[in-house]
Image: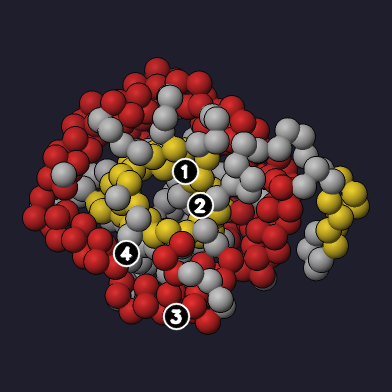
Amino acid sequence: MRFGAVFPNNAVGSDSGAIRQFAQGIEDLGFDHLTAYDHVLGVSAAEYDSTRLPGPYRETDVFNEPFILFGYLAAVTKRLELTTGVLILAQRQTVLVAKQAAEIDVLCGGRLRLGLGTGWSWPEYEALNVPWERRGERVEEQIRLMRKLWTEPIIKFDEKFHTVSYGGINPLPVQRPIPLWLGGISDPVIRRVATMADGWMPLFRAYERGSRSSQKPIEPEAAVERMYAMAGAAGRDPAKIGIDCRIAFEDSTPDDWRSQYEMFTRLGATHITLVTVNSSLVGVDAHLNGFRTMMDALR
């Protein structure tokens, strides 16, 4: 099992010293990966009610831009895998994302894992001038295009959303291709995981603490069994598809953490990511101590 920690945006903020302290502290605790959340734009809680904007984050939440953050972390960490959890790919320019990801992978020596998703914040798509509709279909094409860009020096690509006429990125990444994991628990996401992803980042609770969503949590066993069945039907070996599950600090006890860990282990999880985001912990040291407490309980 590989263990990771979610970067607690609000606790660490944008101070470069605090960012370095936290990342190096997580590395010193023996964690294998550090996961960063992604939002380009915070939207007003006063303007959108939960029926129009169901996700938990608003304009008061700090979000570091993942690729810029990872460029910095590549220089101040030695072995941590850097993971997005998840990058909202459908609202971004695909070739630019491929270029940025390749550069990060070069700078960190092949320690990048890209978690991808379609997101829930339609005002963010609107602000970035990207259609909200057909975002799932767009992501599938984006995955195909990025993998070609990461493995071939010159490509020709012409599909529904993208045209690349004999071009390529340079430098290519260390990992060819960079691992692509998908986040989400909807039926279309499970199908994409089974048929085209390297791994899955399911949130078996609809959202973390603080959610305004009315979506009901999914049953983990049924979801994993469905993904495995789809993978087998597609001619893939389910054992080669990683699963990264999350365990939250807040409103839980060590017994809860151990119970969830045991369940995820039975399901075939390859990674466990611990979460202190949206907790009562205050400051970098408090979050590091929270992660230490969780790891001590699970080891």
Residue 240 visible? The answer is yes
- The quarter of the picture where residue 225 lies is bottom left
Residue at 61% over, 54% down: 89
Q: Nearer the viewer, residue 285 or 57?
A: 285
**Which label lies toward us, 2 or 3?**
3
Q: Which callout, 4 or 3, points at the residue further toward the start of the chain?
A: 3
Q: Please report whichever mark, 2 or 3, sits nearer to the chain's N-terminal start.
A: 2
* Label 1 to label 2: alpha-carbon separation: 6 Å
Residue depicted at 59% across the width and 27% down the height: 107
Residue for badge 2: 115
**Going from the N terminus, do you reach mark 4 or mark 1 first?**
1
- Give the CA separation, mark 4 to mark 3: 14 Å
Work out whether residue 48 can be spotted. no
* Residue that label 4 marks: 268
Q: Which mark is residue 146?
A: none
Q: Secondary structure at mark 4?
A: loop
Given residues 94 and 174, the one toward you in this image is 174
The image shows residue 193 at horizontal and vertical percentages of: 51, 67
Dot 4 amino acid type: Gly
Question: Residue at label 1?
Answer: 83
Q: Position of residue 126 (x, y in %)?
A: 65, 57
Q: Residue under label 3, please give it.
A: 229
Q: Earlier in the sequence, mark 3 or mark 1?
A: 1
- The reply to whether the C-beta atoms of the residues labelled 1 and 2 are less than 8 Å apart is yes
Of tags 3 and 1, the one toward the viewer is: 3
The structure residue drawn at horizontal position 45% and vertical position 20%, both measured from the top left corner, is 76
